[in-house]
């Protein structure tokens, strides 16, 4: 074995430097070659045991299950980064682009009026707005209480809130909410059912009502007769409520009776506008329930006394 003496001290130093350089190059070359996707997958019989918080994922070569590389760790096709934590393999540190280091995705920068803002940067394009760059997209909030509208294609010169309230259309931002129609207030004859909706120009919750008739009171089916859920009127009739009568005659569907003490009520309905002629000579159009199908059930409506406060 070669031993360094005082005479050959300089020679030893040069040899050590030479070996270190060439060994480091050899190690990098070996690591780089080992990171290229193999022609044939050779995976261990058992998948690796990952540390807590580190997921087991399929490598980018679609070969083996590996533990996702974490921030600051070496990454490659065979050792991908943990994308769930926003990490990506940064190959800029390696000239051969074979391996990289897991780093947080910096995101895309934003450009506004010729100025470049980095991802996550907060800036003030004017005294009125505070904005933030988020992965190439700019989000702004007003700094003044009155200026709540931002410039846009449909409104390049927005007015303040107080100035624009008169011209603001709330229906453009309205989330329509409508309840189902309630039970008819009468089990026979003309009644009324209600619902609540905000489908209007002001987007306000209002109560709507419609006329309804489950079945006529005259000629009710006697107990013991055959169960008929839906019955159509044999002849055309005029609908009446208070002192008003429908201009046209109709053959509406009615709900029959269920002989096993169950209730028979409308199941599927729609609403139609019907024109009425009133005693005073006036005409008006009222929404009326049109029965499509009926169903027998045990959830019978309660006493109709709580419907007495409803007015048509």
Image (cartoon, rainbow, N blue to C red):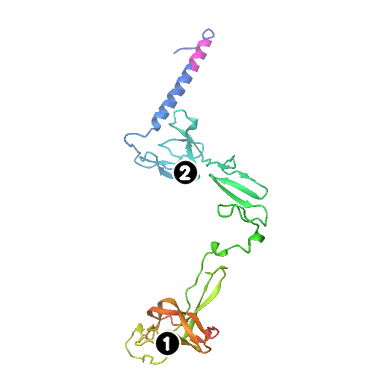
Q: Is residue 219 left or right of residue 156?
A: left
- The answer to which image quadrant residue 236 occupies is bottom left
Q: Position of residue 272 (x, y in %)?
A: 44, 77
Nearer to me, 34 or 171: 171
Count the marks.
2
- The answer to which image quadrant residue 289 occupies is bottom left
Residue extending farthest front: 281
Q: Residues within 10 Å of mark 1 (few under 14, many from 20)?
A: some
Nearer to me, 295 or 173: 173
Of the two numbered discs 1 and 2 in the rendering, the one whose residue sits closer to the viewer: 1
Can you tell which mark lies on residue 109? none
Examine the rendering and report whether any part of residue 171 can be seen. Answer: yes
Q: What's the residue at 55%, 52% (across, down)?
A: 153
Residue 223 sits inside the magenta stretch: no
Instruction: Quickly name the residue at label 2.
Output: 83
Q: CA distance from mark 1 to mark 2?
A: 70 Å
Q: What's the residue at 50%, 82% (across, down)?
A: 284
The secondary structure type at the circle numbered 2 is helix
Q: Main secondary structure of the magenta part?
A: helix
Residue extending farthest top: 7
Q: Which residues are magenta?
A: 9-17
Residue 12 sits inside the magenta stretch: yes
Nearer to me, 256 or 2: 256
- Asked if 222 appears above or below 165 in the picture, the reply is below
Instruction: Quickly name the residue at label 1.
Output: 238
Q: Position of residue 73 (x, y in %)?
A: 49, 36
Which quadrant is home to the N terminus?
A: top left
Q: Residues within 10 Å of mark 2 (few under 14, many from 20)?
A: some
The secondary structure type at the circle numbered 1 is loop
- Asked if 191 appears above or below 271 in the picture, the reply is below
């Amino acid at each position: 074995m070669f031993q360094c003496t005082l005479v050959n001290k300089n020679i030893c130093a040069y040899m050590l430097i030479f070996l270190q350089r060439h060994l480091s190059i050899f190690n990098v070359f070996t690591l780089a070659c080992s990171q290229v996707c193999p022609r044939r997958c050779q995976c261990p019989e058992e998948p690796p045991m990952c540390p807590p918080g580190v997921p087991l994922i399929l490598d980018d070569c679609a070969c083996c299950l590996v533990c996702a590389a974490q921030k600051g760790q070496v990454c490659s096709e065979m050792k991908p980064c943990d994308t769930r934590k926003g990490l990506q393999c940064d190959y800029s540190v390696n000239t051969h682009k074979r391996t990289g280091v897991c780093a947080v995705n910096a995101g895309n920068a934003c450009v506004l009026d010729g100025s470049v803002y980095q991802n996550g940067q907060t800036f003030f394009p004017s005294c009125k707005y505070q904005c933030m760059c988020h992965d190439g997209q700019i989000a702004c909030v007003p700094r003044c209480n009155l200026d709540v509208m931002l410039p846009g294609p449909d409104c390049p010169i927005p007015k303040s809130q107080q100035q624009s309230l008169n011209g603001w259309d709330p229906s453009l931002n309205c989330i329509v909410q409508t309840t189902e129609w309630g039970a008819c207030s009468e089990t026979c004859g003309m009644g009324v059912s209600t619902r609540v909706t905000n489908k209007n120009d002001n987007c306000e919750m209002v109560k709507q009502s419609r006329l309804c008739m489950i079945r006529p009171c005259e000629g009710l089916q006697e107990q013991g007769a055959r169960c008929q859920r839906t019955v159509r009127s044999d002849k055309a009739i005029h609908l009446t409520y208070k002192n008003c009568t429908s201009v046209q005659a109709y053959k509406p569907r009615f709900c029959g009776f269920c002989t096993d003490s169950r209730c028979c009520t409308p199941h599927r309905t729609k609403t139609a506008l019907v024109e009425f002629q009133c005693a005073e000579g006036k005409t008006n159009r009222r929404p009326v329930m049109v029965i499509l199908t009926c169903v027998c059930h045990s959830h019978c409506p309660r006493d109709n006394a709580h419907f007495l406060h409803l007015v048509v």
